[in-house]
Image (tube, rainbow, N blue to C red):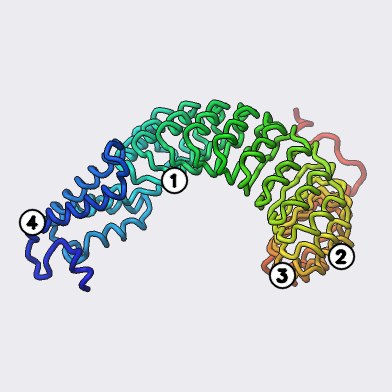
Amino acid sequence: MSYANRNKFESTNGEEIREVDVKRLQNRHWWHLKKKHCTKAEDFTSTMAVESVKNGCMQLTRVFADDEALINKKLPKELHLRIFSYLDVVSLCRCAQVSKAWNVLALDGSNWQRIDLFDFQKDVEGPIIENISRRCVGFLRQLSLRGCQSIADGSIKTLAQMCPNIEDLNLNDCKKLTDTTCLALSRHCPKLQKLNLDSCASITDFSLKFLSDGCPLLTHINISWCSNITEDGVEALARGCPKLKSFISKGCKQITSRAVICLARYCEHLEVVNLLGCSIIRDEAVQTLAERCSQLHYLCISGCLHLTDASLIALAQHCLKLSTLEVAGCVQFTDAAFQALSKNCRYLEKMDLDECVLITDTTLTNLAMGCPRLEYLTLSHCELITDEGIRHLCLSPCAAENLTVLELDNCPLITDASLEYLTSCSNLQRVELYDCQLLTRVGIRRLRTHLPNIKVHAYFAPITPPPAPGGNRQRYCRCCAIL
């Protein structure tokens, strides 16, 4: 109670606070924020943020002195701000309409440190971003503009200038943005750590070069479907941002083995790498990545058709913390590669082996023995998998305790016997069985009886109707005959 009383702006008997006390509290709050935000007296943006806070504090005190609401008189203003800090954008805007005091509280920059405008994407345009930037100034740390396709470079330039302390910026699907955006971020946002440029198709190598020059703290970047990115941009990024932990480049078909090797050499702290569809990389890229980035726990090389067992064997030797591996469409991988993985990578939880057409039941036997944490397994289009492999998998500790999703689409040798084995997987939540021609409705019904909460996705072609009695069918329908 004594702590609360010390922070109140009004006295306990309801009398107005004296002007001297107000001034003393304002100065104390202003000096604390100035010490926190201004490392240099000449730092213009930080000083602007402090002045904004000082003015806001004075305005808040003045408004609360005139406010008649009991809650505003009894509850310390610091607690008001603390409560408001947990509200989302919609709630803050609604609270701003309650009263003058709540308007000042709700629109205080300290409450707008993390903003996600995805729900408003159809209505968000440049002026809105610029207004938010002017209000939040140095407070803004995290902003998501995912799907805001009306946003252009000018708005992001204003954002970068007004909010230099931003650390996490999501620009996914902001299709109008160009290299000018990354130039502004490089010049004004040295604290930027996470940047998502997914589907920003106009981004080129220049953007990555700008970021390497001005954002050395960058740890996460997503350049998926930025088809203009080449090995030159990736190499510049790797040299300037050695703290990278996550690199996602789905669909960047111009990324070569050289680009991946540069990443591995200069960014040894990489933990997440997604090279989906980077179809021209070779074994030497994955081998270098495995040798230099031992902390790697997520790797997607789906669609990299030129990779062979040598890549997986290198991962098995060096990346013992690997938990997620996606290798869909890597048609040259064989049982030998997965045998090496199962021996050393015991933390594997998710594996996508879709269209690894050379693997057999031997792979399932090895995974059953060596990967006790396996939760998610995709075997779609693995046409050599039989009931025997499913039996070994279901007898393993991972199936009994952890296996939750199993995808077996287009496995033509799977029969109802496999469904019988799956009944022992007590935690199984979903199984995919499309185009497994030897399965029957009876087998699926029996599986659902043992696992009532399971979702079974299967398809059975409709039964061909028997020929009509009375000889051959009429060649034309009645309508055609009339015409």
Tell me the distance, in whole angstroms, between the alpha carbons under discs 4 and 3: 67 Å
Look at discs 3 and 1 and give the one toward the viewer: 3
Q: Which residue is mark 1?
A: 119
Tell me the distance, in whole angstroms, between the alpha carbons under discs 3 and 2: 21 Å
Q: Are marks 3 and 1 in contact (CB under 8 Å)?
A: no
Tell me the distance, in whole angstroms, between the alpha carbons under discs 4 and 1: 45 Å
Residue drawn at 70 percent across, 66 percent down: 402
Look at discs 3 and 2 and give the one toward the viewer: 3
User: Label 2 is placed on what type of residue?
Assistant: Ala
User: Label 1 is placed on what type of residue?
Assistant: Asp
User: Label 4 is placed on what type of residue?
Assistant: Val
The dot on residue 417 is: 2
Above or below for 215 versus 451: above
Per the image, label 1 sits on a secondary structure element best described as: helix
Percent coordinates x, y for residue 357 in the rendering: 85, 46
Is residue 442 among the parts visible in the rendering? no
Q: Which residue is mark 3?
A: 401
Above or below for 145 versus 31: above
For the residue pair 257 and 442, the one nearer the viewer reads as 257
